[in-house]
Image (cartoon, coloured by chain):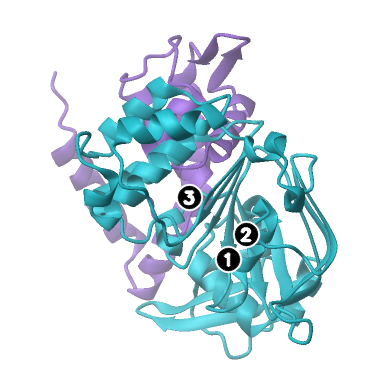
Chain colours: A cyan, B purple
Amino acid sequence: MVQLDQVSFGYSKHKKLFENLTLHLEAGHIYGLLGKNGAGKSSLLRNIVGLLYPLDGRIRVAEREPAKREPAFLQDVFFIPEEIYLPSVTIEQYLKMLAPFYPKFDEQQFRWDIAELDIPQKNKLTGMSFGQKKKFLIAFALATNTKVLIMDEPTNGLDIPSKSQFRRLVSKALDKERLILISTHQVRDLDNLIDAIIILEDSKILLQHNLDVVTERLCFGTLNNVEFDSRVLYSEPSLRGYKAVFENSEQEESRVDLEQLFNAVMENPARIQKIFSY
Amino acid sequence: MEFKDKQAIYLQIADYICEQILLNKWPPGERIPSVRDLAATLEVNPNTVMRTYDFLQNKEIIFNKRGIGYYGDESAHEKIMGYRKERFLEAELPDVFRTLYLLNISVEEFNARYIKFISETFPVTT
């Protein structure tokens, strides 16, 4: 559904943000994109939706080239940037203006979702709080039923109950034909929601796997001692010994801790690559 | 649903479903929630719930009627007991043994406590 082959991008020719990046993403999954500040997550997302153009390489999204911005491409892709700007109109006016661009737009679903998200229906969009605006756009995005849905830090600014509603709505929105890609620093907000992970760092993809594969190869748990244990990739002291990420040599079933996985990848990129290379 | 830290999520969801069946909230032989509905309720990825359903199907605790949905097996209770017993003996009991050993608690003391616990918690009502 989303294919990047040998893609290079930078805001100037001399300083590339990423080089020879290859990434293949499939429909039917919710991908989480993680990376440190400035790693290039937002730029990568903007390349995928055709808001920025690669310097080199090829990008295909839903069988089209994003940079061409063909209507057939645009009606099947929705992107929510981190900072959003909405026009000074009511929900009804916005719907009338923009929903027709999305042939699969489901108005009933939209109305249901904004009710669920407690969005005031009479206000102008500009009169809403930041969190309400964001929730409005998330509801609109989900209702467009585009094949590709990309969200940059969607849970920023959402209150506690909204985060829970967000997970419920996104879980409901996933189907076999749809690809959802979410970049975030708030990994706990996405816990259990994403089923595949992409870690971007230092102009490279350090890890891109389904979480099933991650738990096959790595184990997340508590160890009494980590000093002489060569399996350990990352550890931090905890009340009961050490919370650790270690090679899963005994086929143990464990639960991925995204924060620890991220730290393990940052500390041991070479070993991670080796573990996931076969 | 509150998930525990350590265990794989799909297995925790399996435990949840087994509990609903054992408590007769989802009686054996009747339809259980769809993958999508349960995923939304638990706020988890539907692929994870699918994995749970595959797992429980393999254990013959639930089964799939094509095009209709998933159902609890008629003899789900016995199968769940079997599966839970196996898991307890393999995964949880060793932890109990480790603690007994660490604290130097004898098997006799353990046994006495066990008998007392059973008689107090589940008194025979004949």
Residue A203 in the image: above or below residue B99: below
For image coordinates 72% across by 43% down, the residue present is A26
- The reply to whether discs 2 and 1 touch (Cβ–Cβ < 8 Å) is yes
Looking at the rendering, in which quadrant would you find the N terminus of chain A?
A: top right
State the image quarter where residue A179 is shown.
top right
A107 vs A157, nearest the viewer: A107
Element assignment for label 1: helix
Residue shown at 17% from the left, 26% from the top: B124
Classify mark 2: helix, strand or loop: helix
Q: Residue under circle 1?
A: A42
Q: Residue at x 55, y 9 (%)?
A: B68
To which residue does mark 2 refer?
A45
Q: Which residue is mark 3?
A: A192
Q: As shown in the figure, which amino acid type bears the numbered disc 1?
A: Ser
Q: Amino acid at mark 3?
A: Asn
Which is nearer the eye, A33 or A255?
A: A33
Q: Chain letter of disc 2? A: A
Q: Nearer the viewer, mark 3 or mark 2?
A: 2
Residue A116 lies, in percent from the top left, at: 28, 33
How far is the residue under mark 2 from the one under mark 1?
A: 5 Å
Q: Amino acid at mark 2?
A: Leu
Q: Residue at x 60, y 9 (%)?
A: B67
Locate residue A273 relative to residue A42 in the image: left or right: right
Would residue B112 be seen by someone viewing this image from the given angle? no
Report if residue B60 is visible in the image.
Answer: yes
Number of marks in the image?
Answer: 3
Q: Are marks 2 and 1 on the same chain?
A: yes
Protein chain holding label 1? A
Callouts 3 and 2 in the same chain: yes
